[in-house]
Amino acid sequence: MFTSPYITKPVSVSEIMLKVMLALLPGIGFYVWYYGPAILVSITLASVTALATEAAMLKLRDRPVAPFLKDNSALLTAWLLALSIPPLAPWWLVVVGTLFAISISKHLYGGLGNNPFNPAMIGYAVLIISFPVQMTHWLTPHPVGHPELSFIEQLGYIFSGVLPRGLTLDAVTMATPLDTLKTQLHLGLSVGEIRDMPIYGRLAGKGSEMVATGFAIGGLYLLWNRIISWHLPIVYLGTLYATAGLFHVIDPAHYVTPLFHLFSGAAMIGAFFILTDPVTSPTTPRGKIIFAAGAGILTYLIRAFGGFPDGMAFATLLMNICVPLIDAYTQPKVFGKKAKGAQK
Amino acid sequence: MTDYLLILVGTVFVNNIVLVKILGLCPFMGVSKKLEAAFGMGAATTFVLTLGSGSSYLINEYLLGPELAYLTTLSFIVVIAGIVQFTEMVIEKTSPELYQTLGIYLPLITTNCAVLGIPLLNVQEKHDFIQSLLFGFGGSVGFSLALILFAGIRERMEGADVPPVFKGSAIAMVTAGLMSLAFMGFSGLIK
Amino acid sequence: MRQLHRFHGGVHPPTNKTQSSETPIIASAMPSKLVIPLHQHVGNIARPVVSVGEHVLKGQVIGKADGRLSSAVHASTSGTIATIGYSKVAHPSGMDDLCVTLIPDGKDEWVANLGADYRELSHTDIRHRLRDAGVVGLGGAVFPSDMKLYGGKHQIKTLVLNGAECEPYITCDDRLMRERAAEILLGAEMMRDLLHAEEVVVGIEDNKPEALAAMQQAIVDGKHARMEAVAVPTVYPGGGAKQLIRVLTGIEVAAGVRSTEMGVQCFNVATAYSAYRAISYGEPMLSRVVTVTGNVERPQNYEVLLGTPVAELVAQAGLKSGTQGYIMGGPMMGFLLPSDQVGVVKATNCIIATAPTLFPAPAPTMPCIRCTRCAEVCPAELQPQELHWFAKAREFGKAQDYHLFDCIECGACSYVCPSNIPLVQYYRYAKSEIWARERDKTAADTARQRHEYRQFRLEREKQEKAEKLAQKERAALLAKQQADAAAATANTDEDAQARIQAAMARVQAQHDATQPRNTANLTPEQQAKIDEIEARRAHIQELAHPEADLDKHHEPPKE
Amino acid sequence: MLTALLVMSILALVLGAGLGFSALKFKVEGNPLVGKIDAILPQTQCGQCGYPGCRPYATAIAEGEADINMCPPGGEEGIQKLAELLGVEAKPFGAGAAPKPKAVAFVDENNCIGCTLCLQACPVDAILGAAKQMHTIIASECTGCELCIAPCPVDCISMEPIAESVTTWKWQYPVYAFIPSTEATRR
């Protein structure tokens, strides 16, 4: 016998996840346009691994497999992870990352809805710490004008590690715009000199700035459909902008423009797709603001002063740790108990 | 001034005593089931560690000197044990519940490797008195921070559908590992 | 125009009201039997005052209000009492409760009843009459109205009449306001008088323009001063008392606070109507308007005698095939009736015949993903996802910290949940567990108190005994000293001993003579039996106090 | 060597003095924990724990003499709460100490001989009666401790389980489709 209410609004978890994945499509489209179809291979690899791991873990945990495979959450994790690692990464890198993300950081905690850490970001962090070299070989976007790889050649490299005759890895890949910026600053160049390098476009890195724009478009779609609340992306981007702006104003020769930060690395995809994972973010409005602001500041600190080129993943994970406490201490006042001196 | 600030930030975040240096895991695992206990333990450890690193500096500098350096470990343990005993009495008097919840972990602060580790590191790094105090305070704040955040997550996980074999300490260890992973993000921030 | 406020959240489920709202209320046919539960209200169950086989008249009291918080129950028509016993009632537990079954004689013969002009009655008298007439809140809470019509030391500014009726499907208040607006307002006047309230505001959701117009017209026609009917936005649960008060007055009545403390009181429009009928015509609560809708041919509002079996009621509306059960109340907060034989009670505002086509089985439940859609719609501004998390883990203390008891169980959270979690059921479960625990706690506290008092009493008795003994000893000592002094002159010790023995023998003889012992002339079997019992007693004593020495507290104070 | 000894002795002396002083200053009188434990115990005063009543058991727990799993009327719930208060692991009941459904004593008045033995046994004075008079249980005060059963010479006292009624009925724990029911109920 089921109990009231007997009517429900026709929404489902899998529908929500599906819409989020749809919103990733513009970004992925730009990705393919600028970097070739290699990313689709990673996405497919990650998706297959994620579904297989999810099914295996559900079986082991004695939970029904079908409804959870259909909820699309594993697929979304896979997509986000694939989008945050280099598209030309060897196949096993994708598989290991996804495997770790789904099995350890999701299912050991009880699967959907129970994981305290963002699985995709755990996968990313594990990979960047364990395989730093493979994680720095990013494809050069075609506007930069290096020799391009065909789809078959990309596939060949992903699965066998073999490049076409006469090409070295360095010829077709490069460090990310953020990474280059950091290295060059260390070498004593000023921001202005670095920005004149051919890999940079109007806002940030050539190609990558457009991918970020794609993700932003998808994010606006999510906001418009109220799949995500405005607090997280807006506050995150705002804080990142403000922090970067502050340093830029103090010393423009050493600190790039805030817009550069917004359109580089994982800032956009993070703001709209990673921080907004409802399971691992706070639930209260005030909590969301604290969470996003913290993530924004941490992202900037790690980017500008830390040991890693991008801070988005670690900022997310560090703020994930704080979520239970943020939630506990930002409980909003309930109906009738807002006025000062109201009875308990 | 910046030097002091860097020591503080460095010990709290970048070189977090638990999550980066992996010291003091025993109370980290033991007293993190409840948030209140974690706060209590954090406060007790902070008190002991700050006082301990201060006094151990004084002992090392004025009582022992270079010729009696082989006595550092011994004398530090004695001093820390004394402070822990004192803390224990105060807590038993002021908060019996906390005393009960902390249980064996309260006297065990004496053998908490973080508590001994920090004064020894102070000697090693040749910190002066203020630096020693700050290092001790920062380290213990870092310890408390990690402990409290960890307790928050563990309290939340009470309701999670964790597989039976992973319930309790197992999943706590996994969580500690993932937290440590996240704290690696701070690496390189301050040398 | 009145300044309206808004409350947080709310949902817009399909209303499904037009099916039943466009036809007038008709009287339900006389059923073959009436099953009248004696517990139709909040408070103590009414005490039955009739006997099986007795003939009762319409309006005759069959259950008397028991205690301060209780309400009377009446025979809905004339007839014979068939049974007084336990049978299924309209309660989500599906359990049995005390009911009176009445077989109508068809004459519908009234008991002598006295109407009166309320202005000529004292307030206490009115309240007594309401209580004896069994008037309770008809919005669903069934709280005895007499208790609510007492402002006490609080100054009541606004009397809110609730005509919002926000639940889907239900239209009984809508029809009542369209057809009997004048009497509702007269009831409201009486209530205003009892509460010394300044103004009366009737809140009606703006999806019921006809009812609103009827009420506004009646206010003008009846020349009611400081009374207005106001359209409030249609949003579920805008008809919740707290929500409606908030919308109309801006006052938020927190959980556990009486609205009178904030200067407001709220009644359902149907309650005002019934209260008016009870005083002016002396008619106790015998019937109410019930919406019969859902999987029926002719959805319709009926004036139904309390106790009418649900099956007989829905049959009149033309039950369609495929009906699987009946929801009492609306689809958001109602519950499935355990049987179609339960009687209509004072809380029954609506009966919905369910069918899979109307109410498909819910999709499988998924885990909570903390999307906070529930928090966005919660009218009590709670964090339903946290409450669910704690209730699921049975962490009741935490659930209470997160204001579990502020939850009004409106179901808006479950309605929007993408994971289809039966959130409200979790809250109800947690609440009933906490209540049970509280009962246990109270019982434990009483037991502790009684035990401690007993200990104290035993201790005191022991002391008293010891004191008496000491006194006796002192007296004996004194006597002995005197005797010794006397003995010096004449008697010896042996002499005294002999005299005492003689006295004892004398007493024994006397005793035997006057009181022949019943064990004097026993047959051998009897003697054997007594011995056996004695042996068993001794054994039991031993068992009961195995550690008599250690266990001083349980030692009876006889030694 | 001598300096080392000297230094350590000075240290020991100073610390010893300080601790001795604070031991006097922060002396704890009584054990405030007893009251807290007693508040958790169900107050049936049944003695099933082996102690004469709830408070003695609470004292024993506070002093570390008794285990927390010896109170069947408190149920699993009680053990959980004690474990939480004391910061120890909850443990299952020992053999033969399983909790029973709640019950009240009932005197069969046809057989009662009015011996008052049960009155003396009742820890909460919940039995009404006098010598050679019929006894009866005040059901609302009865804790269901069963202590009155043994003393009765005519075995006229029995335990009646308390049935659930509409007013004491509890909502069920929702059944999750994806968690096997065996796991959902266990905790």
Image (spheres, coloured by chain):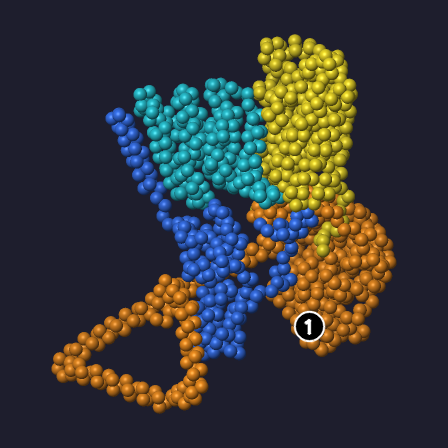
Chain colours: A yellow, B cyan, C orange, D blue
Count of marks placed on residues: 1
User: Could you tell me residue A146's position as x and y percent?
Assistant: 74, 13
Position of C359 with respect to A279 (left or right) is right
Regarding residue C257, the answer to whether it shows in the image is no
User: Could you tell me residue D82's position as x and y percent?
Assistant: 49, 50
Q: Residue furthest left?
A: C489
Q: Residue at x 76, y 63 (%)?
A: C340
Label 1 packing within 10 angstroms: few (<14), some (14-19), many (20+):
many
User: Could you tell me residue A167's position as x and y percent?
Assistant: 71, 13
Along the line of sight, the residue nearer the viewer: C25 or A6: A6
Is C295 above or below relative to A90?
A: below
Q: Residue at x 60, y 42 (%)?
A: B162
Position of C513 with respect to C67 (left or right) is left
Is C429 above or below relative to B47?
A: below
Position of C111 with respect to B68 (left or right) is right
Along the line of sight, the residue nearer the viewer: B26 or C334: B26
Q: Residue at x 67, y 63 (%)?
A: C95
Q: Residue at x 42, y 61 (%)?
A: D52
Kind of element beneath mark 1 = strand
Tell me which chain the residue with mark 1 is part of.
Answer: C
User: Could you tell me residue C414's position as x and y percent?
Assistant: 71, 46
Rendered-image quadrant of the N terminus of chain D: top left
Is A166 above or below relative to C234?
A: above
Q: Which residue is mark 1?
A: C84
Is C508 above or below relative to D130?
A: below
Type of amino acid under label 1: Ile
Within the image, what quadrant is residue A327 found in?
Answer: top right
Regarding residue D124, the answer to whether it shows in the image is yes
